[in-house]
Each structure stands twice: as C-alpha cells, then as structure tokens.
Image (tube, helix red, strand yellow):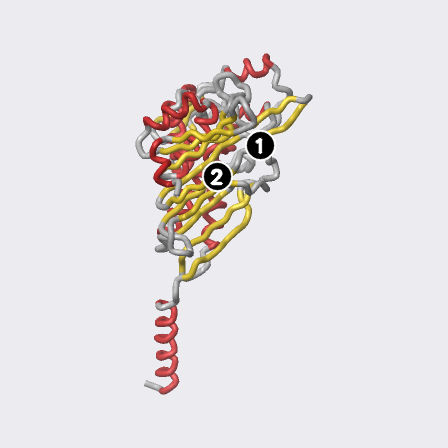
C-alpha cells in the first residue's frame, strides 16, 4: 500500500474516532412557528435544529388552518364525500383523538368549532359580527357528532363544517419533536412551543425540569413573567389554557378566545387558567381547552377521574385574589 493511502486511512480512522467520542452537550434552539415562539433544550452531540424545523414545517403543512394549502385547509373546503386521509396519518390521528376528547368532555372540546372561532374574530377567517341569528345558524353544523371516521376517511354531515386544530396543534407539535429527538438518541430534553411543553430526563443542572405557571393577568403581549405556581417534572407533558392572552375589547366588553361549542359564545366564568399534566402533549393541550370551557366545578372532578391526568386550576374569587385548586397528584410536583 502506498504511504499516502496509509496516511489517508489513518486520518479517516482518527476522524471517525473523534466523531464517535464527541461529548454530548446541552443544545439551545429558539425560533418561531404557528405564530408563536419555541424554545428547545436537549442533550446531544450536535445541533439538531434543522431536522426539528423540518418536522415543524410538516406539522404546519398538515394541520394549519392559516396555511391555505395544508391538508386541514383542503378538508375545510371539501364537501360531504369521504376525504381520504390514508396518506395523512398525523391529521387522522389528531381528528381521531379529538373526537375522543369530545366524548370525554361531553362536547366541551370540539374540533368542529372553527366557524364560531372565525365569527368571533379569533380564527383564520373573520365572518362578520357574531349576532345571535348568525350563531344559531352556525350551531346547526357545529358539533363533533356530525363528523364520521370510516376506513381511513373523514366525512362531514354538512359541507359547511370546518375543523380547527389550533387547540391541539402546539401540543401535538411538541409530541412530534419529542419523537424526532428520541429517534436521534436524545433522552434529556425540554420542548416548549407557545407555552406547551414535553419534558424528559434531566435539565442542564442534573435535576428534574422546573416549570413555572404564569399568573393569569391580562397579557396580550405574552411578556408577563410572574409565576403563580411552580412544578418540578420529568417524563411528562404540560399544557396551559387561559383567556388572559388572547382577547379583545369591543364596545367596553371583553371577549376571550375560548368558545363554548354548546352556546357559540366565549366562556364567562371564574376559571382563569387550566393546566394539565399528561403523558403526551396532545392530550394535555386538548383537556386544558376542555376544562376552560367546562369551568372548574365540572373540570376538577373530571380531571380526578381520568387516569394518568393531573390538573391545576387558577380561579378568581369574590375578592381581587386568586385561588388555586388542584387534583391530588399535583402536590407531589409542587416542590
């Protein structure tokens, strides 16, 4: 063998050895997606942000209502003939799980609420003033029981039906990123997209992840950094829903973004925010929304009855103070 070939081979062996022995360090990524900000912290040998971004773009292409070319947008324009989702397993999964959450919550969570979200000015299309007559007409084609899954297809009972995945898209995106990181051999991570989180392993200090739950004060700019509660978690997902960031005031009246699918109106009750801890972020995100619609009197007993689910509720009382109500399992994480 020529001497130059021996040197090249030795160099290649050294390069492989150095690469395989490269030390894992915590990587920190941030960016924007779905109109919000993400932050990822994970222990890996290299920066995986390009691959993560590809996964997020895929979620947008499947589930975004604001992307006119997404699979969900195409379904919203579709008629009552079966819409084939066999090539779109993510969309099928979200719809299937959403229908399950609707049944659990007696329709408090409802993926078919898009027309009502739009008419109140919080969706991808603003339909006009939310008069009682308009709302009544929309309630005729809003409702999860009007949607059918059959042999890999989803079917509307009314062509005017539209789906809104915004209540679960951030949570599901956290699950997708978590799956991607696991496939890269990453076991220690904190994935956060717009406040929804997937957590695993340890943080850079070698301890479980310390998560703050914001004080629910009017904060449309998302700049409030005051923590009402703190939880120490790992190998769990957490999502918070509240009406203190997405709202508007018209003619002196405040309108929040959480719409009750039963009445067609924004919810009005003492529950300011609902935080759910679950095994996956899609579940946490969906149930947090359902609990906000239900109110704490109905949500707390439901949360207690669900396996592997814990919840924390921040409510207003008769004074200017706030009170915190939780399921029993939350106490183990308040340390």
Asked which quadrant contains residue 99, the reply is top left
Return the x and y of residue 225 as percentages of the image width and height. Answer: 55, 43
Label 2 vs label 1, nearer the camera: 2
- Cα distance, mark 2 to mark 1? 17 Å
Q: Is residue 55 left or right of residue 244?
A: left
| Disc 1: CA contacts within 10 A as few (<14), some (14-19) or many (>=20) | some
What residue is at 41 percent from the left and 53 percent from the top? 203
Q: Is residue 162 left or right of residue 93?
A: right
Asked which quadrant contains residue 171, the reply is top left
Classify 293 as above or below 234.
Answer: above
Q: Which mark is residue 7?
A: none
* Circle 1: element type: loop
Q: Nearer the viewer, residue 59 or 317?
A: 317
Residue labelled with disc 1: 246
Asked which quadrant contains residue 313, the reply is top left
| Disc 2: CA contacts within 10 A as few (<14), some (14-19) or many (>=20) | many
Mark earlier in primary sequence (2, 1): 2
Q: Locate the N terminus and report the quarter of the image it occupies.
A: bottom left
Q: Which mark is residue 213?
A: 2
Q: Nearer the viewer, residue 170 or 204?
A: 204
What residue is at 43 percent from the left and 49 percent from the top? 190
């Amino acid at each position: 063998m020529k001497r130059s070939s021996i040197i090249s081979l030795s160099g290649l062996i050294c390069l492989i050895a150095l690469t395989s022995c490269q030390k894992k360090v915590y990587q920190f990524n941030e960016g924007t997606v779905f109109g919000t900000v993400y932050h990822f912290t994970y222990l890996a040998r290299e920066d995986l942000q390009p691959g993560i971004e590809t996964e997020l773009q895929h979620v947008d292409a499947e589930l975004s209502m604001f992307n006119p070319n997404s699979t969900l947008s195409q379904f919203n324009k579709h008629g009552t003939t079966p819409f084939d989702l066999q090539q779109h397993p993510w969309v099928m999964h979200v719809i299937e799980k959403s229908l399950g959450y609707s049944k659990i919550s007696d329709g408090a969570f409802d993926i078919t609420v898009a027309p009502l979200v739009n008419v109140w000015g919080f969706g991808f299309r603003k339909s006009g003033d939310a008069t009682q007559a308009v709302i009544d007409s929309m309630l005729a084609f809003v409702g999860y029981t009007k949607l059918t899954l059959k042999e890999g297809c989803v079917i509307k009972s009314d062509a005017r039906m539209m789906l809104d995945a915004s209540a679960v898209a951030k949570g599901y995106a956290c699950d997708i990123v978590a799956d991607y990181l696991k496939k890269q051999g990453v076991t220690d991570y904190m994935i956060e997209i717009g406040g929804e989180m997937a957590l695993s392993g340890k943080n850079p200090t070698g301890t479980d992840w310390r998560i703050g739950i914001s004080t629910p004060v009017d904060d449309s700019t998302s700049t409030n950094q005051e923590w009402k509660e703190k939880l120490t978690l790992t190998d769990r997902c957490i999502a918070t829903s509240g009406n203190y960031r997405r709202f508007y005031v018209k003619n002196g009246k405040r309108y929040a973004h959480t719409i009750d699918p039963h009445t067609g109106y924004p919810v009005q009750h003492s529950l300011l925010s609902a935080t759910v801890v679950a095994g996956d972020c899609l579940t946490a995100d969906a149930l947090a929304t359902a609990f906000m619609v239900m109110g704490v009197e109905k949500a707390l007993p439901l949360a207690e009855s669900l396996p592997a689910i814990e919840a924390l509720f921040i409510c207003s009382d008769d004074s200017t103070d706030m009170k915190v109500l939780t399921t029993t399992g939350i106490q183990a994480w308040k340390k």
